[in-house]
Image (cartoon, helix red, strand yellow):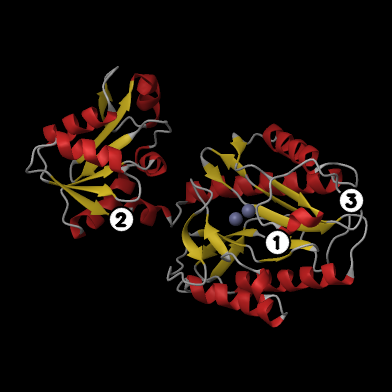
Amino acid sequence: MVSRLERLLPLLAAAEVEAYLVTDLLDSTYLSGLRASNATLLVGPGRRTLVTDFRYRTQVAEEAPDWEVAEQATGEKLSEALTRVITAAGVRRVGFQSGALTFALWDKLRAGLPAEVELVACEDFVARLRRVKEPGEIALIAQAAEMADATMVHGFETARAGLTEHQLRLEMEHFLLTLGAEKVGFDFIVCGGPNSAKCHAKPGARPLADGDLLTIDLGARLAGYHSDLTRTVAIGHASDEQRAIYDLVHRAEAAGIAALKPGAVGKEIDAIARGIIADGGHAEHFGHGLGHGVGLDIHEDPRLATTSEDVLEAGQVITVEPGVYIEGLGGVRIEDLCLVTEDGCRVLSAAPKPAELMVL
Ligand code: ZN
Ligand code: ZN
């Protein structure tokens, strides 16, 4: 992981900080390799200190062998351990992640550190590095995407009128775990009928019924890396209006995927897909962004959204997921996971996505 740290150093130099405190756990994992619930880093030129506790002693040796470990003693507060480590480092300007350091911790550090140590609010530089994936990360995400594909197909085979959303969710989550995923990537969204009009509905006790739209949004987690996949189908039969909405979302998604390439800007890609949905008369029924980066976190940078200035680069993994949600009638969302390549993109997900609404 040392090379990741080397990529971070120029960003610290530009921010004129001698050291950088990494309190975001996923950033900490990304840089150090350690997957722990307590892991804070102090990094800088020639410096890579990992603050964790007794519980991770063995794991540190296996996962982060290159790091200098400052163990938080039993009974010692994290603020005390960090104060100790920063003071011993003898650094004056210490950057911190303004979005990932609580005010309570900042307050304790400020009170404990010598007056000449300046705490400098910085953006999350590690999140910027995490946007572009390395081949090993892409391989894990692609494998997690395959598991999601298989689970979606299993869901299509299982879903039927009479089965509740909750039962279908349980069956699918169980199936995914038996494939070897370490965890479900997030709580599966399984929503039928009127619930499908809610983008992030919680699966409930309502049985699926003939004529329902059914939206399934799922993903796997594998060695920390996520996949994300959504399909919408109909149960029993579909109305013309349901088919028309599906067709609109299908076309918007295809246009969004076709627009992915290095140099493209998040808001421009969003506008292409959103324009198709607006032309279909459903602008007000698509109220979320078009897509998001996926990696150690299920939602991370870059973003495809109306205000996103993020510029795509080869090696980024991003979702495209337009939707149309109409209260009463139901909703349609289609989501695929895409890898930005040198000349466009490669779609990593391969679950069936017919041009016409699939009726189970
Ligand atoms: Zn999703
Ligand atoms: Zn998503």
Ligand 2 in which quarter: bottom right
Tell which of 188 and 132 is nearer to you: 188
Q: Which mark is residue 123?
A: 2
Disc 1 marks a residue whose amino acid type is: Arg
Q: Going by the image, does 212 lie left or right of 181?
A: right
User: Tag 2 or tag 3, which sits nearer the N-term?
Assistant: 2
Residue 114 sits in quarter: top left
Question: Of all residues shown, which one is farthest toward the bottom?
Answer: 279
Q: Alpha-carbon distance for marks 3 and 2?
A: 48 Å
Q: Is mark 3 within 8 Å of ligand 1?
A: no
Q: Earlier in the sequence, mark 2 or mark 1?
A: 2
Query: What residue would you read off at disc 3?
Result: 209
- Residue in the picture at 73% in, 59% down: 197
Q: Disc 1 to disc 3, how far (Cα)?
A: 19 Å
Badge 1 marks a residue whose secondary structure is strand
Check the picture and name the quadrant holding the N terminus. top left
Per the image, label 2 sits on a secondary structure element best described as loop
Label 3 amino acid? Ala
Q: Amino acid at mark 2?
A: Glu
Which one is closest to the eye, mark 1 or mark 3? 3
Question: Which residue carries the number 1 mark?
Answer: 333
- The CA distance from mark 2 to mark 1 is 33 Å
Within 10 Å of disc 2 (Cα), the crowding (few <14, some 14-19, many 20+) is some
Q: Position of residue 113 (x, y in %)?
A: 13, 36
